[in-house]
Amino acid sequence: MQNQKLVFQDLTRDELEGVLLEVLKQQSSSYVRHSDGAIVNVELSDESIERLRKKAKYQAKQIYQWFYQRFVFDFELMSDLAKNLRTWLKENVEVYHLDEKFSQQALDGTHKFLWTLFDGKTIESVIIPAALKEKKFEEAFAAKVSGPGKAESASAEKTVVTPNPRQVSPSEFAGKESDSELDGDDWARLTVCISSQVGCAMACKFCLTGIQGLDRHLKTHEIVAQVWKLRSTAPITNIVFMGMGEPLHNYDAVVKACKIMLDQNGMSFSKRKITVSTSGLVPAIRELGKAVDISLAISLNASTDEQRSQIMPVNKRWPLAELMKACREYPLGSHRRITFEYVMLKDFNDSVQDAARVAELLRGIPSKINLIPFNEHPGSEFHRPSDEQVKKFQRYLLDRNLTTTVRISRGRDILAACGQLRSIFGSARGTEKHKDVQYSEQQ
Ligand code: SF4
């Protein structure tokens, strides 16, 4: 056994079982003294090893259920485990906890969290509630700020509240406080958007995280801990890897985290409820399809190679033809589709001609298109298209029987776009452009 403690959230259930089996074998070993005085370990019989294997399997299941389903993280409190096992776990396994630096909830219920990691780096996670029917942002803003119907919708549209680092609020998800923004009684879905890296190397031009550059990959436990922590305070139903980072650039840690999230004795998320979103790392898409059964999203954002390469450098390495081929060959289960995210940038990729080319690109791929009108952030060179233009684009695709939704910008009043909180509070690496953003925020 290593001197260094194992981190619990790094272990799949199979790995935990393997660790426990070794412990049980050591505890079951017996020794005999030979006539020459030598002490020798008596080998365990196959039957004994099989019995221990079953025991380890059962124990791993128990521990997983305590931690991931009952949110008990103190091994001492796992009351149906043998005392010596609890002691061994306490001495050899550590549970990783994220340190909350800041959290803030938007008027629409979106709740953003900024975490500090062991090395002082920061990452973000966001809880995004979806009601069966939501009021428009402007209505919600009016109800919250001035009472129903009093606020000017135009000024609400422009309002951006910059978080004050001194006003640190608790991590509890306070979704119910936002019921005034909902027409329905309850949330239909609570999606947590998680980070896979500190920063990102992909340098997409429309993304604040891309501007910040890559600091490092997250470890499996740092990914799993985001979901565990938030699920312990809110009934999370869906997970999307759409926070900071390109998940497939941190392939091994992300795949392992997905396995832990899917485990029926652990977090027990359905394969349809976990979505990995990629900018288009073609070889990793092919590997992902073989490694784990989850939903795939592609951050498309353009209708031609020329256009896409301008805003997403990854396209120079794996152009659209290769990306679409990988999508066509991606193993989809029954009733499953690939989601294509399309950030709409005013006068850049928002024309009806773009919509026509998108329809052509997706021909033959079971797909769902998610249009995302650009969420403007300080320092961005792009603008949000008009609602009319977004509707025209959507209508063109709907008329061609392509399922197309428009994502309502969530958390506009709390800078909920990926990388925004971190740019103000965090340890972003700081390109020249990023320093400008920070500077202007402090004025
Ligand atoms: S959009 Fe995604 S892949 Fe592109 S820079 Fe931002 S975080 Fe990275």
Image (cartoon, grey):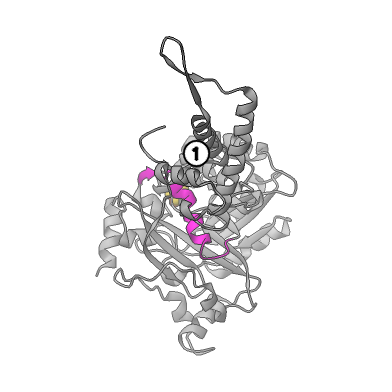
Is any part of residue 345 visible from this angle?
A: yes
- Percent coordinates x, y for residue 271 in the rendering: 65, 48
Q: Is residue 218 magenta?
A: yes
Foreground pick, 335 / 259? 259
Screen quadrant of the C terminus: bottom left
User: Circle 1 — which element?
Assistant: helix
- Percent coordinates x, y for residue 394 in the rendering: 64, 61
- Percent coordinates x, y for residue 360 in the rendering: 66, 46
Q: Residue at x 61, y 61 (%)?
A: 393
Foreground pick, 280 / 17? 17
Q: Is residue 149 magenta?
A: no
- Percent coordinates x, y for residue 286 in the rendering: 59, 35
Q: Is mark 1 within 8 Å of ligand 1?
A: no
Q: Is residue 45 left or right of residue 86?
A: right
Q: Is residue 328 above or below residue 144?
A: above
Q: How many marks?
A: 1
- Image: magenta residue range: 214-236
Foreground pick, 271 / 441? 271
Q: Which residue is mark 1?
A: 251
Q: Is residue 91 above or below residue 283?
A: below
Q: Residue at x 56, y 67 (%)?
A: 129
Q: Is residue 182 above or below residue 351?
A: below
Can you tell which quarter of the image residue 327 is in? top right
For badge 1, the amino acid type reads Tyr
Disc 1 residue crowd, few under 14, some 14–19, many 20+, Cα 10 Å: some
Can you tell which quarter of the image residue 183 is in? bottom right
Q: Residue at x 49, y 61 (%)?
A: 230
Q: Residue at x 39, y 53 (%)?
A: 209
